[in-house]
Amino acid sequence: MSLDGHNLKNAKPRLVVLGSGWGAMSFLKALPSNISDTYELIVVSPRNYFLYTPLLPAVATGTMEERSIVEPVRNFIVGKGEFYEALCKDIDPVAKELVCCFPEDAGLDSACFKMGYDVLVMAVGSVNNTFGIKGVDQYCFYFKSIEDANRLRARVSECFERAALPATPEEERKKLLTFVVVGGGPTGVEVAAELYDMIEEDLSKLYPNIVKDVSIQVVELMDHVLSTYDRAISIYTADQFKRAGIKLVLNSRVASVEDGVVRVVNKANETTDIKFGACVWATGIAMNPLVRQLQEKLPGQSHFRSVLTDDCMRVKGSDGSIWALGDAATIDQPKALDYAEQLFEQADTNRDGKLSLEELRQLLTTASKEFSHLEEHARFLDSQTGIKRFGGLVANSLSPADAAAASSSQPFAQLVLDGSTEITKEQFKDILGKVDKGLRALPATAQVANQQGKYLASVFSSNRVTGAPELDAPLADKVQPFKYFHKGSAAYVGSDKAVFDLPKIGPLTGTGAGFVWKSYETMSQFSFRNQCLVAADWLRTKIFGRDISRV
C-alpha cells in the first residue's frame, strides 16, 4: 500500500509526525484545533499512547496504576488529523517517503505501507545505552516503558514470594531480596526511593520474617548521587538514603552483569560482586536506530547521539523538509573553540596566561549568552558541586578509567577530579573541544522536549511550512530561534520527601517539597482525566496500601 505525496500548488502540505513521546505530544496538543485547514496532519508511532514518564517508578511499585499516566494519542489528534499505529522502518529524504509497519507484524508485507510526506517532524526519542557492558541486555531491567515497569513490579513480587518459601536457603534469600539500581541520576534515585516506600509501608507487614534481609543498593560512577543538582541536594539525598538503609555504592562503575550478579569496580580498581534478585539499569541513552539511519543519508551529520538541527529545529542537510526535537535532536551551536583565543584573552584580566576558577566561571557565564551550550558548565562551576570542591579532591579522585568516563559526560568535571585551582589556555582549548564535539546543547529531559514541542507548534501554526525550499525561504526571516528556559529539576527521595533545584531560588528539600512534588506531578498531567486518576492513586495508596499481586 502506498500513500503518495502531494502537489503543493493544489493541496495542503502533508505534515507527518513520528513518535508519541513528550516532544510529539506537546507539539500536537499545542496545535490549534483548526490546524487541518493548513496541513494534512498524520501521526505515526508504534505506541498508541503518551506515557507520563516521571511517574514510571511509581507504577513499578504499585503506587500508581499504569492507566493513570497514559493518554491515548487519538485524544490529542481528534479533529486535527490521522493516527497510524506503526513503526517507521525507513526514511528516504530524497523521495520524501517513509516505510512503516504495524509493530507486532513488522517485516510482513501485508502489514507494511509506504507514505509520502512534505514535512516530517522526528520525535522518536532515544534508546537505552548499555555502553557495551556485557550482560546488561540479558539480566537487567530497563526503565523507559510501561512494559519495563510492569516487568520490574512482577519481578519484585516474585523475589519476595520465592524468598518466603521455607525451602529457600538463607544465602539465596538474601540474594533474592537485594535490589540493585545502576545510575544515581533522577530516575535511579526515584526507583530506589519508590522501592523503599513499597517495602517499608507494605511488604514489611506482609513478609515480617524476611524483610530484615532486604537490601537496596545504588551504583553511581561519581562520588555523589544527583550530580547535576546543587551539592546541598546531593548531600540531603545521601543522608535520606542512609536513614532509609539504602546503600550508595559510589565512585564505582559496572564492569559486567551475569545471571544474578553485577560486578562493580571502584576508584581503587577493586572488584566487588553484588548478588541481586533484580537489577535496574537507569543510566545512559543512545541514538535511536531510525535517527542513525537518517544520519547516514544526510550530509554534515556526525553527532554521536542525534541529528543536528539549526536553531529553529530544522534538520541540517534536509533542505528544510525534516524537523526534529527531543532526544532525537541536537541544535548545532556555533563552535566555542573557534573563539577560544578571544574568550581566554578577555577573561585573563591579569595577563598571566592562566585563569583562576572564578575567572573561568565568569567566562563561561558570559560566553553562554552567545554559546548556549556552555550554560550547563557555567552552572556546574557555580555550584557547590564544582567551584567549592576544587582543590579538595586530590586524595579522593577517581581512578584513571573512571575519571575518563566522568569527564566524557561533564568535561569540566576533570578539573574537579584533578583538584585543580587554575587552567591554562591549552587546557581551556582542549576542554572546549570536548564540549563542542561530544555534549548535547540541551539535556535529554522531558522538560526540553516539552518546550521544543510547544515551540514547533507555534512555528507551524503561525506559518505555512511546505518542506519546499523555494516556498519556505521567507521562514528564515520570520521564525525566531528556539530558546530553552530551565525551570528547575526535581526528584522524589522516599518517605514522602522530595528535592527541588530551582533557578535563583536554590534547593528545596523535605516533606513540604514532597507535597509540592506530588501536586506538581498531578497537575502536569496532559488531561483532567489523568489528573483525577493520579490524585486518586496517591490517596488510594495512603489509605489502602499497594497491590502487590503478580497478575
Image (tube, grey):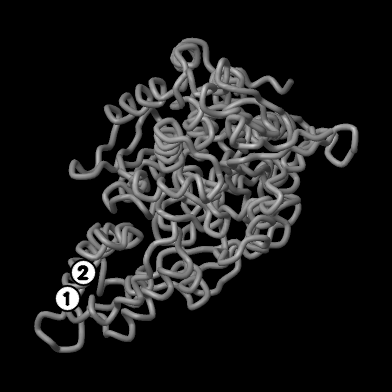
Decide: is 252 above or below 452: below
Q: Which residue is mark 2?
A: 363
* Amino acid type assigned to the residue bearing label 2 in the image: Leu
Residue 388 spot, x, y in % from top left: 22, 64
Residue 430 spot, x, y in % from top left: 38, 80
Q: Secondary structure at mark 2?
A: helix
Going 29% across and 31% down the picture, which residue do you hit? 513
Q: Quadrant of the C terminus?
A: top right
Residue 6 spot, x, y in % from top left: 67, 36
Left or right, 352 with reference to 456: left
Q: Quadrant of the N terminus?
A: top right
Real-space Cα separation, disc 1 to disc 2, in angstroms: 6 Å
Left or right, 518 with reference to 95: left
Sequence-wise, which precedes: disc 1 or disc 2? 1
Residue 281 spot, x, y in % from top left: 60, 49
* Amino acid type assigned to the residue bearing label 1 in the image: Ala
Going 41% across and 21% down the picture, which residue do you hit? 522
Crowding near the residue tagged with mark 2, few <14, some 14–19, many ≥20 C-alpha atoms within 10 Å: some
Decide: is 427 above or below 519: below
Q: Which residue is mark 1?
A: 347
Badges 1 and 2: C-beta atoms under 8 Å apart? yes
In terms of image quadrants, where is residue 431?
A: bottom left
The answer to which of 504 and 162 lies nearer the viewer is 504
